[in-house]
Amino acid sequence: MTSETMTSTPAKRVRGTVPYEDQTISTRAIALLAGEQHVSIDVHGAGQDGARLSVAWGTLLLGFTAVDQVDALAEAFAESKAAAKRIPGRLDPAILGAEIGDEAYLPAISVGFREVPRYGVSVQTLAPGRLDSWAHRRNCLHIRVGVLLFPVFDQGAHASTLDMLTRAATIASATLPEHS
């Protein structure tokens, strides 16, 4: 994961798809996704004021206070399902390690959602990798949700992330308030 800061202008709070280029955030966290994803989902104070859902995902910790927030993240991955067909089914771990490099060992990031995040999806064409065995161009799916950017390198990562976010949304519906 990496972190970068950019300037922005305030935008209206709108749920749903926004143009990918619409920069409405001041900080961005980047979480690279490849291979099957695994998470731990915990609920604190279910059914009470101040209830929250925590998703521990590798070195990323996401905190949600309302169902709509979780739904928006799951919706972004669900709407990108067709675009995910343009990325490789599975990457060779050697290629993946060379592409990610030291970024996999950066500090952990915690993101707390206070509003329903906006999202955008694009397919990026990556330049040839650092390894000679990856001499051709490859597509990568970029899913931006609020302050998070998820470069998704293969279909396995996309499918498992969508499954776990759908599970998190189901848990959120049973335990959190409807609106943020």
Image (cartoon, grey):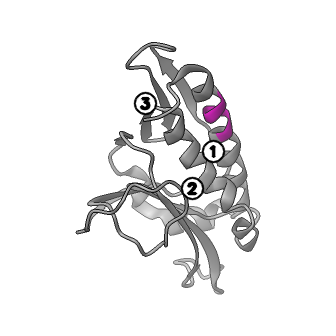
| Mark 1 surroundings within 10 Å by alpha-carbon count, few (fewer than 14), some (14 through 19), many (20 or more) | some
Judging by the rendered image, the residue that carries numbered circle 2 is 33
Above/below status of 162 relative to 82: above
Above/below status of 10 relative to 166: below
Above/below status of 52 relative to 30: above
Judging by the rendered image, the residue that carries numbered circle 1 is 37
**Residue 99 colored in magenta in the image:** no
Residue 41 percent location from the top left of the image: 56, 27
Cα–Cα span, label 1 and label 2 = 8 Å
Q: Is residue 79 left or right of residue 13?
A: right
Q: How many marks?
A: 3
Judged by its main secondary structure, the magenta piece is: helix
**Residue 167 colored in magenta in the image:** yes
| Mark 3 surroundings within 10 Å by alpha-carbon count, few (fewer than 14), some (14 through 19), many (20 or more) | many
Q: Quadrant of residue 44?
A: top left
Mark 1 secondary-structure assignment: loop
Residue 48 percent location from the top left of the image: 44, 13
Towards the viewer: 137 or 111: 111
Residue type at the position of mark 2:
Leu
Residue plotted at (40% across, 72% down): 22
Is residue 1 visible to the viewer in this orientation of the structure?
no
Residue type at the position of mark 3:
Thr
Q: Which mark is residue 65?
A: 3
Q: Are marks 1 and 2 in contact (CB under 8 Å)?
A: yes
Mark 3 secondary-structure assignment: loop
Cα–Cα span, label 1 and label 3 = 23 Å
Residue plotted at (63% across, 54% down): 77
The span shown in magenta is 166-170
